[in-house]
Amino acid sequence: MLDRFLNKVSELIAQGQQFAIATVVRCEPPTSGKPGDKAIITRDGKIWGWIGGGCTQPVVTAEAQKAITEGKPRLVRISPSAIRAEDGVVDYPMTCHSGGAMDIYVEPVLKKPHLLVLGRSPVAQTLARIATVIDYAVTLIVPEADSASVGDVKSIVRNDFSFVDLKVTPKTCIVVSTQGEGDEDALQQAVGSRAEYVGFVASKTKAQKVFEYLQQKGIAAEALNRVRAPAGLNLGARSPEEIAVSILAEIVQFNAARAPHSASPREASSAEGRDPICGMTVDRAKARYKSAHQGQEFYFCCAGCKEAFDQQPEKYMHAVQP
């Protein structure tokens, strides 16, 4: 079973999909999930594997989707009794008839950040190498083969620096480090892409001359204004190695600034409801079971909770604020 699970993980990574792995790390019986049980949960909420049934699956699915969005792992605790709040633990009170408690570790598996480097300059080669060390997916386009100097980095020999056959998204970071070997052509390709980060390794004077040339060729000033030139944070870098470090630092900072943040408590409360019977959190938009009583909507994790509420609504309507 483990080999099939690992094969599935490898398959999803090869497809470039983002997902989360949920692993049961502790349980107090009775629970259907046992320590070591694992499941893959995709961004759209599909589950492959087993972590338990009942209320466990919707809770872990919701937390897995949050983990993928935020890029952060979490420990999910589902328990029938209140537990002292702990940092890094997401608590879900559960009072379902089955009882039991579970701790599930949820870890997102995200796409590697993509760095596209144009040029074979010492800065370009060094940047490509050190970016792979921090697990970036790096593509290097060079005007002629020089495999010895780029190591294991994927390189493409292409005189015109075209990359229309590559998948470039807004999250791709492009660095032009041609340094005299097709500067204008490479930068034109970069600013015409969907990439939100474009860096140009050049002095301000050199960059301005290249910008003026491209504007004469019909490139809009707005497109050129988003180019970071000189590329990199102002660290006082001098050598090609130091310049490469400053550029990578700027890219890390740029990616961190645009990373999604978790929803505020108010946003979360507006999207989630609380089952008044068992106390489980329910996604209001996807809830299959709900009832109305005295002008209020109540949401349930399962048909059993809804039936219990419908039989005695006065008993439960104030148990949990909907």
Image: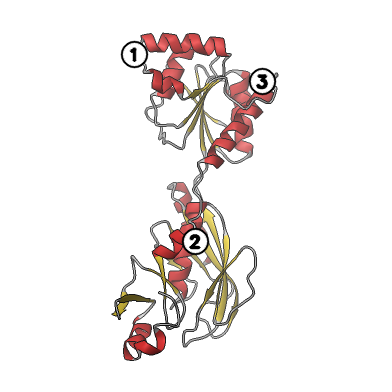
Tell me the element at label 2. helix
Tell me the element at label 1. loop
Tag nearer the camera, 2 or 3: 2
Colour scheme used in the picture?
A: secondary structure
Task: Please tell me which of labels 2 and 1 falls first in the chain.
Answer: 1
Instruction: Count every numbered label the image shows and give the total.
Output: 3
Residue at 50% in and 80% down: 94
Task: Please tell me which of labels 1 and 3 falls first in the chain.
Answer: 1
Quarter containing the C terminus: bottom left
* Neighbours of disc 3 within 10 Å: few (<14), some (14-19), many (20+): some
Can residue 161 be seen at all in this image of the molecule? no
Residue under pointer 2: 265
Q: Quadrant of residue 217?
A: top left
Q: CA distance from mark 1 to mark 3?
A: 32 Å
Q: What amino acid type should be assigned to the residue bearing mark 3? A: Pro
* Neighbours of disc 1 within 10 Å: few (<14), some (14-19), many (20+): few
Q: CA distance from mark 2 to mark 1?
A: 48 Å
- Name the disc covering residue 240, or none: 3
Q: What amino acid type should be assigned to the residue bearing mark 2? A: Pro
Residue 152 is situated, as x and y percent measured from the top left of the image, at: 59, 33
CB within 8 Å, label 1 to label 3: no
Q: Is residue 131 left or right of residue 190?
A: right
Residue at 58% in and 13% down: 203
Task: Please tell me which of labels 2 and 3 falls first in the chain.
Answer: 3
